[in-house]
Amino acid sequence: MAIETLDDLPVQGTTLGVRIDINSPLADDGELADDARLRAHVDTLSELLDRGGRVAVLAHQGRPGGDEFRDLEPHADRLNELLDSSVSYCDATFSEDARRAVENLDDGEAVVLENTRFYSEEYMEFPPDRAGDTNLVAKLAPSLDAFVNDAFAAAHRSQPSIVGFPTRLSGYAGRVMERELDVLGDIESTPEPRTYVVGGAKVPDSIAVAESVLERGLADEVLTTGVVANVFLLAADVDIGKASTEFVYDQGYESEIDRAGELLAEYDEKIRLPEDLAVERDGERHELSLDELPPESGEAAMDIGSETVATYGDVLADSGTVVLNGPAGVFEDERFADGTKNLFEHASTAEFSIVGGGDTAAAIRKFDLDGFDHVSTGGGAALRMLTGEPLPAVDALENSQSLDALKP
């Protein structure tokens, strides 16, 4: 890895801007409903504070206009509980009050600055040099000695707090960022054969993963599930019923059927389609083989069936590496959770298993599954890594190595 990590950073007595991704589900009262993303960054923050650093935490929550667009005080309170060091909160990001809060830190103390997206330019994307000239970076950077990026989940964004600071300060990867790049950036060295499970409802993203890993020879088999499987079934001229077909077209995925068809034509022996699907009939789960399609009443496919799980499970049992990207169905509904739960249980027994994507990780938490070697914190960023696309955050860290500040 060309970027430097915390191993290269002299921490004691230095003031560090640390970008993390703690964008979390919120309860109706605005409090945190899930602290998984905060826990992911505990190792990085604890290490920096234990080594005598003064940490200014930068993060965002929600999107402008959204129900979860709010301040970071609950996040600061929770980090104060999770960490052994003192963590305070400042309701400003780069103003004089924010800079004073940063400059008044003692060794081993942290302050969570306000939601970066309260500042309008943070919700825009810029080239790094332009991002470095925004008010957020230009005003806050002089109060910092170095920049640590641990926000892998936002690494595909070219926003000021992600790519701007490394133009003015030496940049380092935090432990989350380091682990993600080590694992997702080195798929070629993982045990063979490799099986990719592509599912969920984000069809263009999943097909992009399938296309990339097949073209690069990284996948020995691709197992399709979820809406992705429906698109491949349509490409194979299987009548999946009115409701499922209309959903694909209503989502604007018509062109993805053609892409799936092209992949089937070239890699038919490596791409597996479901053998049966589960629909809702009279309020209950009802499984149909492909020969029994389309459903009598046009019901939508909500999950893969038990025969598919058994067949896919055999493939996963013989896999050296399994990469999960997307759930197998509407796992939030208990009637249609079996496909995702059972398939993921099979995947967890592989010699090496990787979980990519927010919905996939959410399913793992819901079913309380463990045994996976790497659960990615990123959705879009993990996708880019899996498809071989560059990440703006990583490029920015690499380019920051030309700066001389704080080189040991």
Image (cartoon, rainbow, N blue to C red):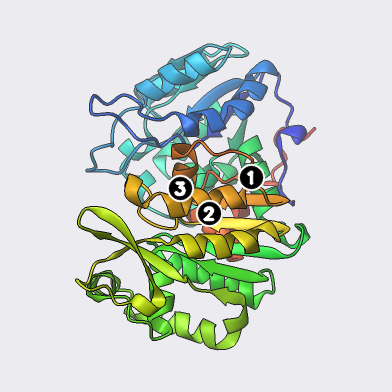
Q: Which residue corresponds to mark 1?
A: 374
Secondary structure under the numbered disc 2 in the rendered image:
helix
Q: Position of residue 339 (x, y in %)?
A: 45, 55
Looking at the rendered structure, the secondary structure element under dot 1 is: strand
Which kind of residue does numbered mark 1 sit on?
A: His
* Residue named by callout 3: 358
- 254 vs 165, nearest the viewer: 254
Helix, strand or loop for disc 3: helix
**Kind of residue at disc 2:** Leu
Q: Which of 339 and 52 lies nearest the eye of the viewer?
A: 339
> Would residue 327 be visible to someone looking at this image?
yes
Q: Is residue 371 left or right of residue 2?
A: left
Q: Residues within 10 Å of mark 1 (few under 14, many from 20)?
A: some
Percent of width and height locating residue 81: 49, 14
Eyeballing the image, is 271 above or below 386? below
Question: Which label sits in the foreground, 3 or 2?
Answer: 2
For image coordinates 34% across by 22% down, the residue present is 91
Q: State if disc 2 and disc 1 touch (CB < 8 Å).
A: no
Q: CA separation, marks 1 and 2?
A: 17 Å
**Mark 1 vs mark 3, CA separation in Å:** 13 Å
Residue placed at 53% from the left, 48% from the top?
163
Residue 343's disc is 2
